[in-house]
Image (tube, grey):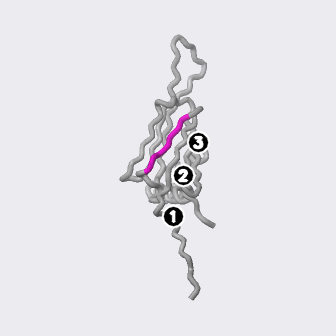
Amino acid sequence: MRKTYLNHILEDFDEFYNTFSGCCSSPCQKNTKDGLSISEDEDRIYIDAELPGVKSDEVEVEIDPKKRHLLLRGENKQTRENAKYHIKTTGSYSYVIPLSNEIDLESKVDAVSKDGILSITLTKNRSHKPLRIDVNVA
């Protein structure tokens, strides 16, 4: 069975987290269920992060090429003048996603925020694709 990019990320993160925490469950396992979705095809990695209540202009997306990780941040600030609140929800969101060497950090990264979902598209490095070799008959 071929391991997907997500499997590699989760295994690497779990190993790293467990090394320092001595714990059996990592925040990455929780985030994959609660608000973070990662999928891939042959050429790209797709990341969808739920950031409910966060305005598009307040979303931060950063790639650190040295640490090879993607950082997503946003804060939900609900304020209305002269409003009485029965329930006021605020919250901050932060995801740190490790990036493998398979990702081309030099290519354009697309990030779109719509209806509380931040969608990011990363391009895979072409040099990491398998090279097909034709076998000649002797």
Category of crowding for the residue at label 3, using alpha-carbon neighbours closer than 10 angstroms: few (below 14), some (14–19), many (at least 20):
some
Q: Which residue is mark 1?
A: 129
Going from N to C along the chain, the mark reached first, 3 or 1, is 3
Q: Secondary structure at mark 1?
A: loop
Give how far across and how far down residue 66 sits, in percent: 36, 53
Q: Give the extent of the magenta segment.
A: 107-113
Q: Nearer the viewer, residue 53 or 122?
A: 122
**Residue drawn at (57%, 38%) of the image:** 50
If you read the primary sequence from the N terminus, does the residue marked by circle 2 or circle 3 appear first? 3
Total labels drawn:
3
Q: CA distance from mark 2 to mark 3?
A: 17 Å
Q: CA distance from mark 1 to mark 2?
A: 14 Å
Nearer mark to the viewer, of 3 and 1: 1
**Which amino acid, mark 1?**
Lys
Residue behind mark 2: 45
Query: At label 3, which amino acid type do we have?
Result: Gly
Sequence-wise, the earlier of marks 1 and 2 is 2
Which dot marks residue 35?
A: 3
Q: Residue at x 55, y 41 (%)?
A: 119
- At 51% from the left and 69% from the top, the residue drawn is 131
Q: Where is residue 59 shown, x and y percent of the image?
A: 47, 34
